[in-house]
Each structure stands twice: as C-alpha cells, then as structure tokens.
Amino acid sequence: MSSKRKVAILGATGAVGQRFIQLLQGHPWFCVEVLAASERSAGKKYKDACNWTMESNLPPEIGEMTVTDTNVEAVEKAGNVDLVFSALPGDLAGPVETEFAKAYPVFSKASAHRMDKDVPLIIPEVNPDHLALIPVQRKLRDWKGFISTDPNCSTIQLVISLKPLMGFGLSQVVVSTMQALSGAGYPGVPSLDIIDNVIPYISKEEEKLEAEALKLLGSFNGKEVRNASFKLSASCNRVNVKDGHLESVFVKLDSNPSVEEVEEAFRRFQGEPQRLKLPSAPEHPIVVKKEQNRPQPRYDRDEGKGMSIVVGRIRKDPIMTVKYMCLGHNTIRGAAGAGLLSAELAVAKGLA
Amino acid sequence: MSSKRKVAILGATGAVGQRFIQLLQGHPWFCVEVLAASERSAGKKYKDACNWTMESNLPPEIGEMTVTDTNVEAVEKAGNVDLVFSALPGDLAGPVETEFAKAYPVFSKASAHRMDKDVPLIIPEVNPDHLALIPVQRKLRDWKGFISTDPNCSTIQLVISLKPLMGFGLSQVVVSTMQALSGAGYPGVPSLDIIDNVIPYISKEEEKLEAEALKLLGSFNGKEVRNASFKLSASCNRVNVKDGHLESVFVKLDSNPSVEEVEEAFRRFQGEPQRLKLPSAPEHPIVVKKEQNRPQPRYDRDEGKGMSIVVGRIRKDPIMTVKYMCLGHNTIRGAAGAGLLSAELAVAKGLA
Amino acid sequence: MSSKRKVAILGATGAVGQRFIQLLQGHPWFCVEVLAASERSAGKKYKDACNWTMESNLPPEIGEMTVTDTNVEAVEKAGNVDLVFSALPGDLAGPVETEFAKAYPVFSKASAHRMDKDVPLIIPEVNPDHLALIPVQRKLRDWKGFISTDPNCSTIQLVISLKPLMGFGLSQVVVSTMQALSGAGYPGVPSLDIIDNVIPYISKEEEKLEAEALKLLGSFNGKEVRNASFKLSASCNRVNVKDGHLESVFVKLDSNPSVEEVEEAFRRFQGEPQRLKLPSAPEHPIVVKKEQNRPQPRYDRDEGKGMSIVVGRIRKDPIMTVKYMCLGHNTIRGAAGAGLLSAELAVAKGLA
Amino acid sequence: MSSKRKVAILGATGAVGQRFIQLLQGHPWFCVEVLAASERSAGKKYKDACNWTMESNLPPEIGEMTVTDTNVEAVEKAGNVDLVFSALPGDLAGPVETEFAKAYPVFSKASAHRMDKDVPLIIPEVNPDHLALIPVQRKLRDWKGFISTDPNCSTIQLVISLKPLMGFGLSQVVVSTMQALSGAGYPGVPSLDIIDNVIPYISKEEEKLEAEALKLLGSFNGKEVRNASFKLSASCNRVNVKDGHLESVFVKLDSNPSVEEVEEAFRRFQGEPQRLKLPSAPEHPIVVKKEQNRPQPRYDRDEGKGMSIVVGRIRKDPIMTVKYMCLGHNTIRGAAGAGLLSAELAVAKGLA
C-alpha cells in the first residue's frame, strides 16, 4: 500500500467517534483527514468541541483540527477523503449516510441501514462473504460508494461466540445481558439511575439482537442474504460497569456436543481477518477462560486490545445443551474497532 | 395469644441475624430473648460483638444484651426460649441445628438441612402444606422440636413468581440472575472485586436454585415430597447493588397463555399468609409493575416492606412462552423475613 | 390553624420539586394546590410530565394533577394559592420569583436572590431574626408578598455546625466537601463521569459557600445584615454517593475550647424551630456520633428524617483549633426540607 | 551494569507484592529471583498461592515459581539474592526486615521502621540526600545490609507537591484526602461498606501523614534528620474509587507567591531521579492540569505510567495562601513504584 487512505469520521465528538480517533492513532492503512460533527461544533477546534472521555490523552494534533459540518460539501471542502466512518446517532444517520455513500465507501456503526436488503451487516470473522452485497448494492442504487454496516454492540460479541457453534446445529439461543454504561454513549445513563441499581431495559436492544443475529449468520446466495433458521430470545439489562458487556448464554445444539467439544470449537475458531492478518484483527477472536468466575468485565474486556471476545463457564444445561458466559468490549469490538476491522477487510478484498 | 413467644437467634451478629433483630422490633407474636453467636463474641454486649450494618439504628436494649455461645446449654442458661431462628453459616448449621431441634422448633435460613427428606423447605405462600412434614420428622427422629427450612434467597423470589404459573402447565424455566452484595453476607464481596465489574459466579448458587425450586413446587403425599417435574436452568451473577436480586426469567408454559393472562395470574395470586393475615405477610405477594424499565432494585426492593416480590416486563418469548423480570429483597423476603413468615405460619397452624 | 395553607410548587417536576411533594404528604399546615413546571410539561398530568426518582411511590392523587405553566396567571388560574415554594433552576428563578413575590410569599431554593441586600437568607435554627428583613423588603419594593431564600445545600449543614461554635470566637473555617450526586439534580452527573472517580469541581459551589456562610452568621441591625467577620475557604468535590454531603471541617476558635466543650456545644444546640416545635423541625438539629468512623452518608443521612445534621470525629487540630466531619441530607435538610422549615417559621411568626 | 540484580519480594502474594511483580517485568536492572509469602502459601506455585488482582495477566513464568517462607534461611535456599523488597503488612514487617537487613539491602513499604532515627524515609525526588543515613545505620547496627523505607501512599504524593513550595516558605498545610480502595489492600474494604458511601476514617493514616511529611522535608546534618518546621493537619477519607488518591490541599506560604508562580514551581520541578534518568523515574514528577475539573482519579492516575503526581485547580486561598488538588496512583507511585525508584536511586549512588 503506497500511502494511507484518508478517512472522515462523522459524529467525531461522540463516544464512538472518540474511540475511532483513539484506534486510528498510528494505524498502518488509515489516517484521520476530516472530523465532522453537529452544526454546534462545526468551526471549532476539536479539543474545544469535544468532551474527551477516553482515559488516554487526546492526541494534540487531533485536538487542533477544525471540526466540519456533517454534509458532503463541508467534508469535501475540509479534505480529500477516501472513505468514511459513521458514528452518527441512529436517527440522523439514515439520510446522511445515503448522501455520502453516493461517492464514498461508508462504514457505519448506526442502526439505520443495518436491515436494508442490499446493505451488508458485517462481522469480519463471521460473514465476510456478505461483503459481496456491495456490488449488488452499487448496481441497484447506481452509486460509486456504498454503505456497509456493523451490528449492535451486544450482538457482535454474541454472534462471534455463536459462529463456531453453527457446526453443532444451532437451533435455540436464550441470552440475558448485563451491559456497560458506555453502550449508552455520553452523557448517557444518569448516575442517579444506576448507583446501587440495575436497569432491566435498553430501548430497542432486544429487538436488534433478535433480528441482527439471524441476518449475520444467514447465507448469501449471490443476490441476497437468507436469515439463519435458529431462534433467539434476549433480555437486556444495564449494569454499573464502565466498559464490557457480559452475557449469560444458553444454547440448544442438535448434535449435543460435550463441554470439551464446545470449548475446543471456541478455541480453534479463526476467521478471515486472522488469515489475512488485518491490522486490527486479534490473534484469537475468542479467548476461553478456565477460572470458574471469569470472564469479568474489568479484568477481561481488554483481551486482544479489546478486539477478542472472552468466554467462560461453559457447562451442560438441563434444558438447552450448553450454557456459557460471553464478554466483549462494547466500544472497541462492539463499536469503533468493529468499523475499523470491516473497513480493513473491505480494503483487503479490493472493495474500498 | 396471651403473651409473646420468646425466641433465640443463632448467628445473631451476622448480616441475616441483624435483619432478624430489626424485623422482630415490635413484632406482635415474638420477642428476642437470647442472642447467640460464635465463641469470640460470647460474653460481650451485643453492641460490642457486632458490626451493625443495618441503616436503621441498633435498638439500644438489644445492644445491651449479652451474647451467648451457640449451644443448647448456653442458650438455656441465658433465657427461657420458645423457638429458635438460625442464621448460622451453612457449614456450621448442620449439627448445631440438629442439637437444638431435639427440644425446640428451629426455623433455619441455612442450607444444611434443606434437602433432607423429612425436613420441610417452606415458602408460606407457595407450599404451606409441606409443613405437614413436621409431624413426620418428629416421629421419625423422636424429637420434641423440629427443623423447618427456608430456601436460598434467589430461589424464594423466583418460586413465588412461578407458583401462579403452575396452572398454565409450567415445563421449563431459564433464569439468569443479577444478585446483590448483601447476599454474600458481611464482609462478603471485597469492594476491589466489584467496582466497575460483574462477577459471573456465586458458589453453589445455581445448584441450589435448580434443586430447591423442584422441591418447593413438588407435592406432598402425606409421607414425602415428590419433586415437581419441570426443568430449570440457572446462571448466577453478582452485581454492584446493595440489596435486591433481579432475575431475567424465561418460562415455557404448556397452555400458551397471553401476556395479559400471565399478568392477571401474578396480580391475583394470594397465599395462606394473606388469608391468615400473618403479621409479616405482605398484602400483595406479587406486585406487577407496568413501566417498561421496572422492576429496579433500588426503587422496588422495599415493596410490601421488602416482603413482596416485584415482576415486570412480561412479554411473549420467541422460544419459550413468556419472559419477565423478577425482583425480591434478598435479606428480607429472601432471608430473615422468610424465616419470620415461616414461623408465623407454623404458629398459626399450631405447630410451634 | 383553621385550615391548611395552599401551596404552589414551581419547578415541580425536578428533583427538588419531587422532594417537596414527598415532604408535603400529610403535612399539618400545608397542602399542594398547584404544580408548575416548564412549558413542555404544562397541560400534562404530573405523572406523565415527571420522571419520578424518589424511592417512595408517587402519591396517586398528585400524579393525577395537571401541571401548569410557570407564571402568575397560569398558577392563579389553576388554584387559590397562599404561598409558593420555588425549586426553579438558578437561571430561570430570578425574574419569575420577582413576579410571584409581588403577590405571594415565595420561599426559594434558587440562588438568584440569596445575596440581595433586602432578601433574607435563612436557616431557621441559625438566623431566624433575619426574617425581619421581610417587612424591610416589602416596604422597599412595595410588594404584598416577599422572597425568602434558603442557602446552598453544602452551606446549610456547615453553617448549622458553625452556629454553636460562634460562642468560642470563630475566626477561620477550612472545609473540603464530598458531595452527593443528587446535589446536581436530574439527569445531573453522567454515570460515565463518576464511576471509579471523584470530580474535584462543582460550578460556583465554593463561591456560594464562602459568601453565604458570612451572611447567614451575620447580624441584623434592624435595616440590614452585616456579614460575620470570620474567614472561610472551601474546596468542593463530587463523589459517587446518592444522597448526603460529607464535609471535612477545620476551624480556628479564639477561646481554644477542648474537644469535650465543642462536643457539648453541638449536643445542646437548639434553635427557634425546636422551641416552637415546628412540624418539620428535628428534635436534635445536630446529632453527635462517637464511633470513630462516622458520620457516613449511607448510614447517617436520614437522622431526624433527614433534617438533622450529623457530626463526628471531633479532634484537636495541629494548626487550627479543632477538626470534625459534618454530614447532611442534601435534598432534605439541604433543599426541600429547608424551604419547608423556613415557611413554617415564617407562618409561626405571622409573616406568611 | 554487567548483569541484573536479583531481588526477593517479601509479601509477594498481596496487592503491593503483585504490583512489584508487574513493575519488575522487563526491568533493566532488577529481576525477580525469590517470592516469599506466609507459611500458608509457602511451597505452592505462585499462581496457586495468589489471587492475582492486577488487570494485566499474571506473567506465566512468575506463576510457575514456587513461593518460599518469609525468613532468611528459606529465601537463601530459594535463590541468590542481591536485594529485598518488603511488601509485608505493618505488624509483621518489623522483626522480619531487621533479620534480612543484617545481610541485605531492604527497601520497605511497611511502616514499622519509617520513624527510626537511623532509617532513611525516602522519596527520591524529595530527599535523596537522606540516603546518607545508610552508612550511619550500618555502622550503628553493625550490619552488612540496611533498611530504607518508603512513606505512606497518601504522604508521598502530598510531599512531592510540597517540595517545590518549600522555596516560598511553607509554614502550614491543611489536607483532606479522598483515598482509593486499593490503599486498603485485598480483600480490604467490604463492598457493603462503600457502596453509596464514604468512610471518613482510615486507621492511623492521619498520624502517618502528619509525622512522615516533617521527616521527609527535614534536613540531614550528617548524623540525623531534623524535622521540617511547618505544621500539617490531615483529615482522611475512603471513597469508592479503585486506584488514585485525591487530596484537597491548602497551604500557607510566607512569601505569598501568585498562582502563576506556584504553577511554574510545580512545572519546573525536577529531582535526582530525573537528572540520573533512573529507569522508573517519570519525565515530569509533577504534571499540572489546567482544566477546571481535574485531576480526576480515573483519568489522571496513570500519568507518567503511574509515577507522576498530578496537580490542578491551583487558586488563591482566603485563609492560607493557595489551595490546589493533588492526585497520585497509590499502588504505583504510592507503593511498589516508590520502592523500585528508591532502590534504583540507591543502586545509582553505589549504596546497593
């Protein structure tokens, strides 16, 4: 690769936008060219427009960049862009991403287009073949660019853990989540709501989990994605944890594997990002913990620089086949890191 | 009732023991006569022996009582006792309770004897008829007293919610818990373990839930309890909440009731304690919350003075029949309040 | 008192407004007649306009009341009001309270008018004589009503503890606060800002503490209040506690009293509310804790139904004279309870 | 340096011991040779003896080491040791360290010997000249080794911030601390004590702060250390933060410098470790934050890899001269990192 691709980040001042900036520091393929945010921020220096909430310091050269408005003209005026990461809030993302996709590859963390028939919903280790929807989409919409989407944070980690179980004949998944505060963005959850408390409801989260998992594990027939045929039921909770969603998973598997076979399937799981050695790919997409009280968010969320998911407590289930715990870093593997890895995959495949 | 029954509390300095003392203040039927604890505490004033962690102040007259050693002789020397509440740790409880039961009715919060064939495991609203095991036990063991046990905290609230569902043909229960810190006693969970974290493991908790629920909802045939025939799978987690266990429950019901029918069954549920108007019986054993983000531990754990359980988010389930959230105050309904209500029921039935 | 005074609450949907509603339930002198809030809420039922965050349930009859807009016409149309409690945010309170004060006694929790020369800033136990500013104010402004203000939450508890020390010749006060989340209102502090953290800054808090304490402990000469002459330095911090501000206080006292003398002064302190037996007056304005690790917010904030302040750890100081810890419930004694007690005092003195 | 010095860690399984192991990974001058702990742990593999609570994974080769008993014979049998780090609990440390010091340089984090007349209490940036007590001590006690001690965690960060203020004529220091949970070791503070709470007491902490600061900033006259002459008053609190002590500091300075002059003194402060470029020396011993709400524990504790202290909110004080906030990582700069830097200094000076 002769020189780095220049990227624009839409929604650059939000929590996911900040994580994109952090993960793009020193990236071998991409460099930050344009930071776009709301009208209120446009024209300001990034350091003045943004309430930086990452634990690592704001890179000074990023802090000095001027934020632009979130439209194609403003972004093109601000720089020469090769591709776009969208960390826009769901309600704004729809039409804005459509506008950008006419000219640019758009990798979106927003939910707006995830379930569009011709838009790929991608986890690079799980369904890299679904990227083949991109030429379908371009032709259909007569676009030079395209939209590729990443799933919801709680979906990503669950589906990575389900992928190696498909070979056992996955038929049912029951999942109860304990999701971190950062999943609600910033300012997000008021402290008065969560101190000494759990909130057993996250708007639209269960619906997203139940719908997206089937598309992700569905099969692409050259024209469209057919949903997988298993059934999934989710119950989603917000807990007082900064980062890292933890999920109690119960699965029914037709071939009734042993705990050891399931553990082995988790351990040996490798995807296209590992084979292609993509820059953001973790060596182990799934890390198995043997301690009886792991994975735990604070200890395990940073495995594989936040790009591995961590499973543990795999055990036989009296009703289903096995149950286990599954943890992922919701703003890295579940958000900005997911977008980055999808873009790397698309670049590696010559699509962006 | 001419005068109050005098009670001894075993394990009086621990978290459950303290809650017993708090709930017995002003009780119309019972009064605290003897406080027993470990050798280390024996001989001290209660206020010096105990690290009082209730939010309400330690009643001064209790604080001045002298703590006795935990054996029959010491307790008999300290006072004239009618019945015994045991809040002993599980490992000690077995032989000590046996000793006391030779002469006294023992209502135990410990797990030691819960699964003994001739020992009733009681939730007064759920299986009051199982108290009929007491004469069986007395005869078998040739005791003047007896042991009656209360279930594990996470079991009690779940089983109260399951009881009104039995009429719909309960066949499967999947439950994932988010349990409060006080469930681990004091000092219990180190703060360094739980800050910004969830611990997906509680020793023996899943096993207790899976075993006790079947006994509680089983049927008594005059001689013994036959386990209920549904299946239950549990996954237990510790979260950073002071009091109040929250549970995601997924149930399969043969008759496929609607959400409204399930809600109605919860609402109209009444048990023997309500019919007998026992002093500690909540007016509504199950309170149904309609807000989409309830029940929540901090807001709802004190419903019915901590003796009601609270359910909410009842909804259809894509795999099972319905799913819902269930909350209970683990140290009131789940511990000391449970013991108290069981004793009240036994007294009302002339058994103690 | 023949019948209850009818009150309007301005800012009724906010955190302090909710606390007013809670404390006014069953009040012997006052009843809630009108609930006023922002335009957005006006016309809605209170239960729909408000995100109720008190642990006790919203009283159903309050929930059914219709919220009115926050101006004199709307309030007069909604009911016949005798006096007004203002829980308005500081920036709105200024002109709105002025408008209401032309016709009604206004008891305000807002900071807008606290330092106005002719407006009393009142803690009923500390400076009840300052209420004599009311006739001064009425005459000067030609109003039928008036404005009386309550201090900032962190000021109230500190100044109650300083009042009995005035007799020892108070010359210097250094205070470092650890303030609760509810002091910032709702939604207030984002959970992502406070988990595993302390925020060493609260906007304008140090300035308020330093200015208000001098006015409160100043002397009224019949025309105006002359500031007290001691000096005060404050450093204010936000900690991860729901309710209850805790303060490390260091004081220099000219007469160099012993620890016992200071403790005795705290203990025997009584104010006008105690002498008049006002409905919201705590029996002991200051409760002294002798345990070496108290007061603590969770255990002690509810002393005197949240209207007592709690001091402890009184000890000699190597630089000043003594140091001690001081705790108060910031939304009861520090906010709604303060307004209520001020209004009770004014009523008892025939001023409202 | 031809080869690395081999070190023994006493108290290796505790929180500070674990941090020593973490910080010694890849250290250019030192390598871990012996891990000593209590009898209960002796003979076990470190990974089995220790409940590893660092967020980074336990280095596998350390996990496989066999833990030895804590006495000279056992340690000498286990390896060839050049120097000893003691992370022993205070009550055990006294005689054990004396035994080791007869033969080895002992760098101790325990409080046992800190105030001994001939034992240096060292912060390398503050009083490196006090290391000259070592030959005095050796001669006096006729030892081949020696004991050098590190101050209490809350003292270290405060005193580093006071050192550059000495030039302004420091006469009084008032400090109120908000200290992290990890300062109490493991299991340490029970979660039930700290959830929704602050504990305004830490055993012996105020006494340590008040005594150690004077010795550290005292002057060495060739024979002994004369205490500095300023006065210090401390009030110590435990807050719900994992790592990082935050302190509100009020100081009286004779020469009445401006805020800018104080800030400049903090900024330009450099010590011997910086001049000698010791491996663990942070580039900036004091980092000044200009944001009005910093330093904050979660964001700033890792400055300089946890070896910098961070100050902010420098402002004029109405009573003293200036006030400011001061933050330090209590288990790195305040514990294991302090010991390491002291040992590096001693090695660089040819003393160990």
Image (tube, coloured by chain):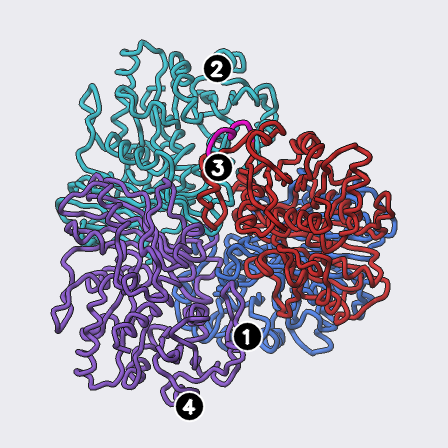
Chain colours: A blue, B red, C purple, D cyan
For disc 2, the chain is D
Q: CA distance from mark 1 to mark 2?
A: 70 Å
For disc 3, the chain is B
Looking at the image, which is closer to me, C296 or C261?
C261
Q: CA distance from mark 1 to mark 3?
A: 44 Å
Specify the label residue B189 is tagged with: none
Q: Label 2: which residue?
A: D71
Residue D73 percent location from the top left of the image: 49, 11
Specify the label residue B65 is tagged with: 3
Kindly give the residue lying farthest to the top in the view shown: D142
As for residue B162 lying within the magenta part, the answer is: no
As for residue B43 lying within the magenta part, the answer is: yes
Which quarter of the figure is the C terminus of chain B placed in? top right
Residue B49 percent location from the top left of the image: 48, 34
**Residue ID at (48%, 65%):** A13
Q: CA distance from mark 4 to mark 3?
A: 61 Å
> Mark 3, residues whose alpha carbon is within 10 Å: few (<14), some, or many (≥20)?
some
Residue D270 percent location from the top left of the image: 28, 39
Residue depth check, mark 1 versus mark 4: number of the one nearer the observer: 1
| Image vertical order of residue B256 relative to residue B159, above or below | below
Magenta stretch, overall SS? loop
Q: Is residue D192 visible?
A: yes
Give the residue type that dot 4 points to. Lys
Q: Label 4: which residue?
A: C77
Looking at the image, which is closer to me, A36 or D56?
D56
Magenta residues span B38-45
In the rendered image, residues at marks 2 and 4 fall on the same chain: no
Residue D79 percent location from the top left of the image: 52, 15
